[in-house]
Image (spheres, rainbow, N blue to C red):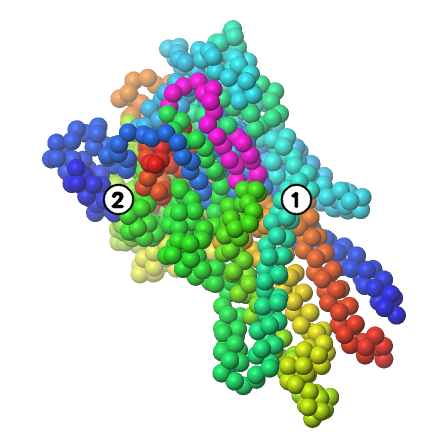
Amino acid sequence: MLWRAIVGRLGLSIVTLWVVSVLIFVGTNLLPGDIAQIMLGQTATPENTEALRVKLGLDKPAHMQYLVWLGNIAQGDLGISKAGLGAGLGTPIVEVLGPRVTNTLRLTALVAVIAIPFSLFIGLIAAMHPGTQLDRTVTFSTLSLISVPDFLVATFLVLIFAVYLGWLPSIVFLRGNETGWVLIKTLAMPTLTLIIVASSQIIRMTRATVLNVMSSPYIEMAILKGVPRKKIILRHALLNAIGPIVNVIVLNLAWLVGGVVVVEIIFAYPGLAKLMVEAVLLRDLPLVQACAMIFCGTYVVLIFLADMASILSNPRLRHPK
Amino acid sequence: MKEIKTFQQMYRDGHVNRREFLAAMGALGVTAATAGSFLTSSSALAATPTRGGSVIFASNLHGPDDTLDPLLGTSTIDYTRANAGCNGLIQIWNDMSLNPELAEEWSVNSNATEYMFKIRKGVTFHDGHPLEAADVVWSMNRHIEDGSPSSIGSFFTLVEEWKAIDKYTVKLTLSSPDADMPYKLTQPQAKIVKKHTTNWYKCGTGPYLVDEFQAGVKSTHSRNPNYWRDTGQHLDGMEITAITDPNARLNALLAGSVDMVITPSAKMIKKIESTGKHKVLSVPSGVYGGICCLKNTAPGDNDDLVQGLRYIQDRERIVRKFLKGHGTLGNDHPINISYGADHCHELPQIPYDPDKAKWHLNKSGYSTAELFVAPVSGAIEDTCLLMQANLKKIGFDLKLKKVPTDGYWGAVWMKEPLNVVSWNMRPTANSMMGIQFGPNGNWNDTYWNSDRMGQLLKDSLAETDAAKRHEMHCEMQKLVSTESGIIIPYHTNILDAHDSKIHGFSNVPLGAFGGNGWAEHIWKEA
């Protein structure tokens, strides 16, 4: 039963990726101008634009360009970034993506390692003492932080820690050879921003689902049996609440991989999301497609994992009516 | 000396104009030439350079299309890298003076159709290969070959041939006179690169080597130990990057994460200077923001409508309020005082005159129009809003259609009947007028064609008599400001901000931090 679900999911994932690639291709083509025009900008003339178009292989009809791309990707070839090709530099997309993927994964991992245990802890603490001063403080601050956009959080942190106190750098300059304390200091600001934004949601979800489970009859039974409250929550409630919590964690992880454009721009962090925005501004179609595939792939995989976790934690889902 | 600083500040803040500033300096016993440099230079009072250290420079734009090939450069970050890594034949430096660079000397025949360049001996590219005439010919031919993506190809349409006479002599033959050619050779795209090069990391002869380059991220550079001239090369190295968000860029400077940032907005200047640790470099230039009325279609084809829109520009207010004094009044033609002798100071300044505007607009028969606005220049949106408000007072309904800058140059500019534009300064008045209003201009963005203009552009290039040449330029500026469809309310200064420990910037108004060519000249206090 579980295997059938997995195979079905894999098939659906490939279809999803394909549909997204078509949408991205059509969408990018709908934008005004092509990469030749955008690269030349105000200095474009019909002659030099046409010359650049031929160099970039844009003289072929759009559907042919798409089919060529699809053929290449089927063989695992992401293609060549159009940008810089005019100089004969034409960088393979794998090379462009490489350092950006590393950067993004590094930041995501750092945030996840700190934010997930922290939020679960705070969420459970709040759930253990509902209605108390502590719970109200947690609820109030998480609600406030969810309502504040990430760029505002980032700007405030920069103002406080970089401009006034001067403790941390306001932007991220990765030289690639940082280790230990230096690396932590370099990444501190974006990490802190993302932890604040991501944690709030996980904390709220943890608290809500655990409290929800706490009102079910079997918990009442456990209380009547005289099981200590701590044990009830960790052993009886948390395991049954795991489905929705994993879901919200996974959505946050996917957001960290592809959705943190604003944070990357504010800290000049060379990650994937910023690359995608730059690629769209340039109409560098193969690069846009490659980024989109990574983002979409991340979502598909993570959500698949979340669903699996839900199914495992809830036997009822294993036997659909 | 304290007085000088005070007046510098007043000039920057727009409390005194250039004339008043120079008069004040005269009163303090400063000669005119020195006073002129005080206008733009913040380092005039600084001490002797120290060697060592490095700087981090943050531009405003970058992306996967960043390039090390000078010819393909399209943005400040590309030009800056080209200047760090390469040299040109001729260099433009303080007060728009021409200086020999890889061309040790050059000569021109009497009617400006033949140039001879003597190429400097003993210069080597970063890969150790010596520079020869053939490299120059190859580099320059890239701009004129068929299918060249060069963005300054239009400067070289008159070129018939670049020829290596011997190992160190290059001859340039033109099909018709061009006395401005040496200025055109100073453009960053016209840097000399190694013949047949494919390794763009080591293509040039410049003061700093490219250690690392990652498009859309950053590049790092270190001092070229075999540089051919002594300009200081005070810095050990530098990092060139960009921070696209203007507030993040400013914060990075204030927090000390970077040392130099380009284009802070005029509103940020007070904040930057209030720290006492940072300085703003404000260089008057020919950069402008303007409004294009297409002359080949309604409503721009109506001369009265354009004239009405000219009189409704409250130019003084724009410069004072929106540019905070870091700009100069526009007179509806691109050639302002920064172009030196070619600027027509005799031409009267067009005033803000709502009555005349009303009269012209009534005569035009229009009572409404639509203008496409994108934030292509710092003050252009505010300017259009002010214009809309002032037009409303005289019963004209100007609709502003806001569009994004993304894709603007291909989709809106030169297409919609009324749109906004920004232009960088070109090295000479003739090249600026030529590309925008000449018969062969690629960017005739108001579709205005005038035979007289074409004739004057051609004649002035061949004219060697200074007075006659000035007269011709005056006529051209008058033609553009009365007949074409361009409205230029203001010229902006080039604004940059830097750590006040950095000194030695030039006043070239053609790009960031003194025409992008700062790398080998600046120094940082230890």
Residue at 43% from the left image edge and 15% from the top image edge: B103
> Does dot 1 land on a helix, a strand or a loop?
helix
The quarter of the displayed image where residue B348 is located: top left
Query: Position of B2 compared to A222: left or right?
Result: left
> Do the residues indicated by labels 2 and 1 lie within the same chain of the protein?
no
Query: In front here: B251 or A113?
Result: A113
Query: In front here: B231 or B288?
Result: B231
| Residue A197 x, y percent position in the rendering | 54, 65
Query: In front here: B445 or A257?
Result: A257
| Residue B44 x, y percent position in the rendering | 25, 33
Query: Position of B503 compared to B87: left or right?
Result: left
Q: Amino acid at mark 1?
A: Gly
Q: Residues within 10 Å of mark 1 (few under 14, many from 20)?
A: few
**Residue B130 seen in render:** yes
Q: Mark 2 or mark 1: which is in front?
A: 1
Magenta-tinted stretch: B210-231
Please tell me the numbered disc located at residue B356: none
Residues under labels 2 and 1: Cα distance? Answer: 46 Å
* Chain hosting mark 2: B
**Which quadrant is home to the C terminus of chain B?**
top left
The quarter of the displayed image where residue A98 is located: top right
Q: Which residue is mark 1?
A: A98
Residue at 41% from the left image edge and 19% from the top image edge: B229
Please tell me the numbered disc located at residue B12: 2
